[in-house]
Amino acid sequence: MALKVELKPNERIIIGQVVIRNDEQRTRFFIEGEAPILREKDILTAASAATPAKKIYLAIQLMYLAQDPTHEHETYFALVRDFMKAAPSSLPHMTEINNRILSGDLYKALKAAKQLIAYEAELIENATRV
């Protein structure tokens, strides 16, 4: 079964190693086969990865898009170690992310990393209130 994708005008999508930018009209197309796919709203750039949790998300994103995700493992685990030292309470989030990575479901690991980003924002907000 094909994946139906609708792109807004000028929206970008990554399919495999290729970035596709839509024209000025809404477009619908179908993707048949297996390839990593990220819509623009889910893409994080190195420049926009300004917090530790976002850097973890970026490392997972690079794993997801890479043909060999093991190249990013060293960076990912170093980021996780540092994050866990700073916020040990994030263990449940890290456990879920790690389990998704170990099971090979990198797309769901990205979704779990979004929850980590939200948790990090809560921690920062609480710290600035005090």
Image (cartoon, grey):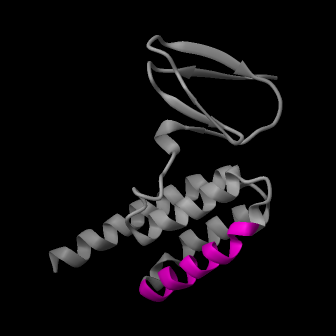
Q: Is residue 20 above or below residue 85?
A: above
SS assignment for the magenta stretch, majority: helix
Residue at 49 percent across and 66 percent down: it is 55
Q: Which residue lies most toward the top here?
A: 25
Tell me where residue 35 sits by quadrant. Answer: top right
Q: Position of residue 76 (x, y in %)?
A: 62, 72
Residue lying farthest to the bottom in this orientation: 85
**What residue is rendered at 62% in x and 60% in y?**
60
Q: Quadrant of the C terminus?
A: bottom left
User: Toward the viewer: 128 or 23?
Assistant: 23
Is 80 covered by the magenta stretch?
yes
Task: Indicate the position of residue 8 as horizontal and vertical percent values.
Answer: 46, 20
Can you name the residue that lies furthest to the left here? 129
- Number of numbered discs on residues: 0
Q: Is residue 106 above or below residue 126?
A: above
- Residue beneath the point at 53% across and 67% down: 56
Q: Quadrant of the N terminus?
A: top right
User: Is residue 81 magenta-colored?
Assistant: yes
Which residues make up the magenta segment? 71-86
Locate residue 101 relative to residue 123 in the image: left or right: right
Kindly indicate the quadrant of the structure image that contains residue 94: bottom right
Side of 18 relative to 39 (left or right):
right
Residue 21 image point, x, y percent: 53, 26
Residue 100 appears left or right of 94: right
Compared to residue 15, the image places residue 54 above or below, namely: below
Q: Nearer the viewer, residue 38 or 48?
A: 48
Q: Position of residue 84 (x, y in %)?
A: 51, 83
